[in-house]
Amino acid sequence: MASSSGRGFIVDADKVIAQTKNGKQVLNLGSGEKALICTPVEGDAVATIGENRKLLIFAVSELPLWAEAVV
């Protein structure tokens, strides 16, 4: 998952399944922020292109894992 502020993390899909109709909050967005992407992780790297047209590549091992607390 990633937001427009540049924050991103890996979420274990099994941990976001909720038993209530309200679901679970995974991403806490600030004023003016938007959720940008939620996609399965495949491979050992993640690439992103910013609004400034710069390419950033991160190793999946460097990305934070979502804890049960709201990030």
Image (spheres, rainbow, N blue to C red):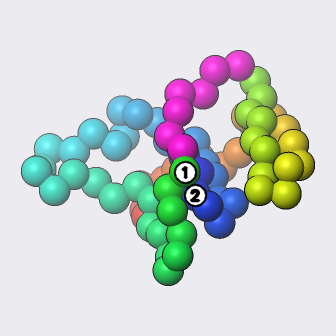
**Residue 49: within the magenta?**
no
Q: Which residue is nearer to you in this view: 20 or 34?
A: 34
Q: Is residue 34 above or below residue 48?
A: below
Residue 41 placement: quadrant: top right
For the residue marked with disc 1, what is the amino acid?
A: Leu
Q: Position of residue 67 (x, y in %)?
A: 49, 53
Residue furthest out toward the bottom: 31
Q: Main secondary structure of the magenta part?
A: loop
Callout 2 environment at 10 Å: few (<14), some (14 to 19), or many (20+)? some
Camera sees residue 58: no
Query: Mark 1 falls on what kind of element?
Result: strand
Q: Position of residue 32 (x, y in %)?
A: 52, 76
Left or right: 26, with 19 as reference point: right
Mark 2 and mark 1 lie on one chain; the one further toward the N terminus is: 2
For the residue marked with disc 2, what is the amino acid?
A: Ser
Left or right: 24, with 35 as reference point: left
Residue that mark 2 sits on: 3
Residue furthest out toward the left: 21
Residue 49 placement: quadrant: top right
Left or right: 18, with 49 as reference point: left
Distance Cα–Cα, label 2 vs label 1: 5 Å
Callout 1 environment at 10 Å: few (<14), some (14 to 19), or many (20+)? few
Residue furthest out toward the top: 43
User: Residue drawn at (41%, 55%), measured in percent from left and top?
Assistant: 26
User: Residue drawn at (41%, 34%), measured in percent from left and top?
Assistant: 13
**Span of residues in magenta:** 37-43
Q: Which mark is residue 58?
A: none
Q: Position of residue 51 (x, y in %)?
A: 77, 56
Q: Which mark is residue 36?
A: 1
User: Residue drawn at (87%, 43%), measured in percent from left and top?
Assistant: 55
**Dots 2 and 1: beta carbons under 8 Å?**
yes
